[in-house]
Amino acid sequence: MDAISQWRKQWFDYIQYLRQEKGFLDDQFVQLKKLQDENSPDFVVEVISLFFQDSEKLLNNMANSFEQEVVDFKQIDAHVHQFKGSSASIGAMRIKNVCVTFKNYCEAQNMDGCLRCLQQLQQECSVLKNKLEKLLNLERQILAAGGSIPVLE
């Protein structure tokens, strides 16, 4: 087995791991990958980069909201709603699930629950970012060696 084949197998196994074993990604990520072609080879990288830029802003906005004298749970809920939508659009299932719980805590105005969810979101974002960087590095290795990215079904 040559290097390209090994990397492709590694890539495929890693995608399966992220989807099935850990639930980091769902089928939406597969749909996103299908939109990428030779005309837009950086499509997924760009979408993921935008997601993490937006995530950072939203996490900071939420953290700042909790530091106000009067916590505006409606405002925080709006940020969580936006976060849930953007995480769903890239298939970040675990982040989306935390957002669902977070929204419930916002509606109940449960400060402790909200702060736990915020921490969990920060953690999940950090972990997912590392996982996706590993995946994208594998893709770069495959492409640099003259191979092509496997197609997901």
Image: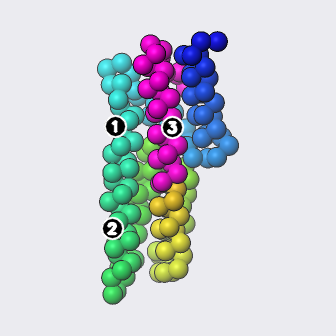
Q: Residue at x 51, y 37 (%)?
A: 134
Residue 92 is one of the magenta-drawn residues: no
Indicate the quadrant containing the N terminus: top left, top right, bottom left or bottom right: top right
User: How far apart are the alpha carbons under marks 3 and 2?
Assistant: 28 Å
Do residues under tags 3 and 1 come within 8 Å of each other at their CB atoms? no
**Crowd tier of the residue under label 3, counting other residues whose Cα lies within 10 Å: few below 14, some 14–19, many 20 or above:** some
Q: Could you tell me the amino acid type at mark 1?
A: Glu
Marked residue nearer the N-terminal end (3 or 1):
1
Residue segment shown in magenta: 125-153
* Image vertical order of residue 43 relative to residue 72, above or below: above
x%, y% of residue 31? 48, 33
Q: Quick one: SS at disc 1?
A: helix
Q: Could you tell me the amino acid type at mark 3?
A: Lys
x%, y% of residue 74? 37, 74
* Image vertical order of residue 151 relative to residue 66, above or below: above
User: How far apart are the alpha carbons under marks 2 and 1?
Assistant: 23 Å
Task: Find residue 50 and report its image quarter.
Answer: top left
Q: Residue at x 35, y 61 (%)?
A: 58
Task: Find residue 70 and report its image quarter.
Answer: bottom left
Q: Could you tell me the amino acid type at mark 2?
A: Asn
Identify the residue under disc 3. 134
Identify the residue under disc 2. 61
Residue 133 is one of the magenta-drawn residues: yes
Marked residue nearer the N-terminal end (3 or 2):
2
Specify the label residue 46 is tagged with.
1
User: Overall secondary structure of the magenta stretch?
Assistant: helix
Q: Is residue 61 left or right of residue 15?
A: left
| Depth check, front residue: 59 or 72 | 59
Q: Residue at x 53, y 72 (%)?
A: 116
